[in-house]
Image (tube, rainbow, N blue to C red):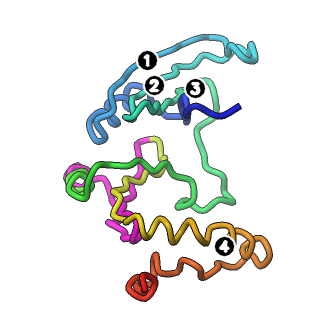
Amino acid sequence: MQIKKIHHVAYRCKDAKETVAWYGKYLNMRFVLAIAENEVPSTREKDPYMHIFLDAGGGNILAFFELPTQPAMSRDPNTPVWTQHLALEVESIDDLMATKAKLEADGIEVVGPTDHTIFKSIYFFDPSGHRLELAANTGTPKMSAMLDAVKWDMLEDWDRTRRAPEHAKWLHDGTLADALV
């Protein structure tokens, strides 16, 4: 068996209508489907929900559940805020910067752009508190080949030491020219 694609990724939201409007306004995601039930089909629990689906481009669907009878949303207190995020690819740096300007014009705090050498990205939060990243690719085939060549060694070193291996430190330390030699 081989996975064909991600059918959808689902998160919880505070307000389904607000979420549809926000993702449409800032990320141009089209609202494609709503499913609402008073009983969960898989578990038969009595728990009303609104399940919304947004077109994230390229056959990808981002979905949300509004759960009005459940306690307020919270985060895993043991996971840093920067860790859990949804990264979405945009076409260009121009698109990245235009979206940053649009978000900031409406008072939404944006971090970045951050230069990861193989892509540049910005970070911000949606109205439900989910951290989002928009990324524009800037890497080259040579960079991809270099990263591919060290991925298993990096994983093995990490597994053994739990310290960041330096095989690809050029991504963030400014030594890219040295790495390309």
**Residue underneath mark 4:** 154
Classify mark 3: helix, strand or loop.
Answer: loop
Q: Nearer the viewer, mark 3 or mark 4?
A: 4
Q: Earlier in the sequence, mark 4 or mark 1?
A: 1
Residue 18 relative to residue 40: left or right:
left
Q: Which residues are magenta?
A: 101-127
Residue wearing tag 1 = 33
Look at label 4 and name its amino acid: Met
* Residue type, numbered disc 2: Phe
Q: Earlier in the sequence, mark 1 or mark 3?
A: 1
Is 133 above or below relative to 114?
above
Q: Are marks 4 and 2 in contact (CB under 8 Å)?
A: no
Residue 178 location in percent, x, y?
43, 88
Question: SS at mark 1?
Answer: strand
Considering the image in quadrants, where does the C terminus appear?
bottom left
Determine whether label 3 and label 2 are within 8 Å by CB.
no
The quarter of the picture where residue 100 lies is: bottom left
**Residue located at (48% from left, 47% from top):** 129
